[in-house]
Amino acid sequence: MIKYILSPKGIILLAFAGAVVAVSVLMAWSELGFTGATPDWLTDLTSRIGLHGAIAGFFNSLTPSLGEDLTKYLQGKGVSVNPKSTASLGDYGYILFMGVALTIGGIAIMIIGREDAEEKTVLPVKK
């Protein structure tokens, strides 16, 4: 197992897995409206395990740079939100990040599948 993980394909797959996890974190951030303002239940949960400050700080650090860029990008593409609805630009950002995560995951699955296809089981031939 460790030999496979340390092989070039294993390292590439670990990189893809890390990318999917990173994009999944960005999905949660965009669902919060590109801020670190978490709902009360999530604040309580992350406070109990001692991670609230780190998570909120990380999300808030993304807001001035990536959050503004995404907002400009989405508005430039013509995305507008009806003020009477409960939707936000973060919902559209969530969709973008979901597409990226699925694409990265699909590429990783293709790499694994290709390796599985190359392995052949040799059965003894009866004479």
Image (spheres, rainbow, N blue to C red):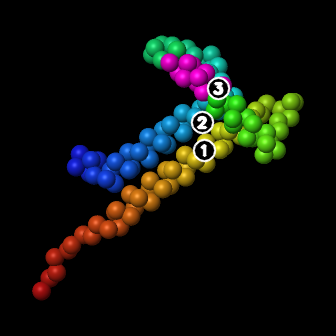
Q: Is tag 1's residue or tag 3's residue first in the polypeptide sequence?
A: 3
Q: Is residue 106 left or right of residue 7?
A: right
**Mark 2 and mark 1: Cα distance apart in space:** 7 Å
How far across and down, in percent of the image, does residue 84 sit?
87, 30
Task: Say which of 88 and 11 sits in front.
Answer: 11
Residue at the extreme bottom? 127
Residue that label 3 marks? 63
| Amino acid type for the residue under numbered disc 2 | Met
Check if residue 56 falls in the magenta segment: yes
**Mark 2 and mark 3: Cα distance apart in space:** 13 Å
Q: Residue at x 55, y 52 (%)?
A: 103
Write the start and end of the magenta stretch as one range.
54-64
On screen, residue 71 above or below 63: below
Q: Residue at x 69, y 35 (%)?
A: 69
| Amino acid type for the residue under numbered disc 3 | Thr
Residue that label 1 marks? 98
How far across and down, in percent of the image, does residue 34 sit?
66, 28
Q: Secondary structure at mark 2?
A: helix
Instruction: Judge whether residue 76 can be spotted in this image.
Output: yes
Front: mark 2 or 3: 3
How far across and down, in percent of the image, does residue 102 sit?
55, 49
Residue that label 2 marks? 27
Q: Is residue 3 left or right of residue 78?
A: left
User: Mark 2 near mark 1, Cβ–Cβ under 8 Å?
Assistant: yes
Check if residue 36 falls in the magenta segment: no
Task: Say which of 52 and 70 sits in front.
Answer: 70
**Mark 1 and mark 3: Cα distance apart in space:** 19 Å
